[in-house]
Image (tube, rainbow, N blue to C red):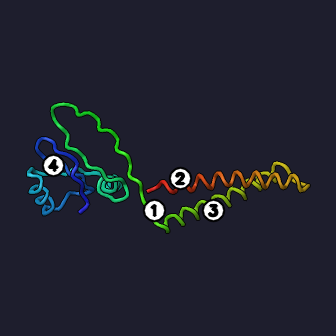
Amino acid sequence: NSCVPVMMDDNQVLVASPFPINPDVEEQLRLRYGAPVRTVITTPASLNAAILKYFGGRGGATSVAPASRGGTTPPASPTPRPAVVRSPERFRQDLQYAIVAFNLTVIVVMILQFIIRPMYDFGTLLGAILISAVVGAIVGAGTFFYRSRQP
C-alpha cells in the first residue's frame, strides 16, 4: 500500500496517496486510528520521499509527535546522529571513488598546465607533477570524507 498517514485534522486522519486508497486499507486505517479517513492526493515522488524520510532505514527515521491544538510546543533539541558502522565493502567502495577522483584530478590539472604553459625542461615538469599530485590528494581526500559521511 503506498499511502502515508499525515496528520489528524477535525477528528479525521489525513492520508497522503498518489491515488484514492483501497476501501479495505481505508477501513484498516479507520480501525487503527479510531477516526474516519480522508485521502489527500499527492505526487508519487513526494510520497516516496516521505516514506524514505520517516519509515526508511537509511533516511534517519524519526518519530513525529502529534500536533497539539492549543498552543505551540517548544522545538526539540537536535539529537546527535549515532555513529554508523561501515562495512568493509562500503569502505573499499569509498576508497575506490577517492582513487578515481585523485587520478582524474591529476590528469585534468596536468592537461591544464600543459595548455597554459608548455614545459620544455625537467624542473618545470617536476613542479607540474607535484602541483597535480597535491591538488589530486586534496580532491581525493575530500571525496573519501564526503562519501564516508553519506548514509
Q: Nearer the viewer, mark 4 or mark 2?
A: 2
Q: Are marks 1 and 2 in contact (CB under 8 Å)?
A: no
Q: Earlier in the sequence, mark 1 or mark 2?
A: 1
Q: Are marks 4 and 2 in contact (CB under 8 Å)?
A: no
Q: Quadrant of residue 79?
A: top left
Of 103 and 27, nearer the camera is 103
**Which quadrant of the figure contains the C terminus?**
bottom left
Q: Are marks 3 and 2 in contact (CB under 8 Å)?
A: no
CA separation, marks 3 and 1?
18 Å
Of 15 and 112, nearer the camera is 112
Q: Residue furthest bottom?
A: 89
Percent x, y of residue 11:
10, 44
**Amino acid at circle 3:** Ile
Disc on res. 146: 2
Disc on res. 99: 3
**Amino acid at circle 1:** Arg
Identified at 13% across, 63% down, the residue is: 24
Q: Nearer the viewer, mark 3 or mark 4?
A: 3
Q: Earlier in the sequence, mark 3 or mark 2?
A: 3
Disc on res. 13: 4
Q: Nearer the viewer, mark 4 or mark 1?
A: 1
> Residue tagged by mark 1?
86
Q: Are marks 3 and 4 in contact (CB under 8 Å)?
A: no
Is residue 96 found left or right of 86 in the rendered image?
Answer: right
Q: Earlier in the sequence, mark 4 or mark 1?
A: 4
**Amino acid at circle 2:** Tyr
**Amino acid at circle 4:** Val
Is residue 89 found left or right of 21 in the rendered image?
Answer: right
| Label 3 crowd bin: few (<14), some (14–19), many (20+), radius 10 Å | some
CA separation, marks 3 and 2?
13 Å
CA separation, marks 1 and 2?
14 Å
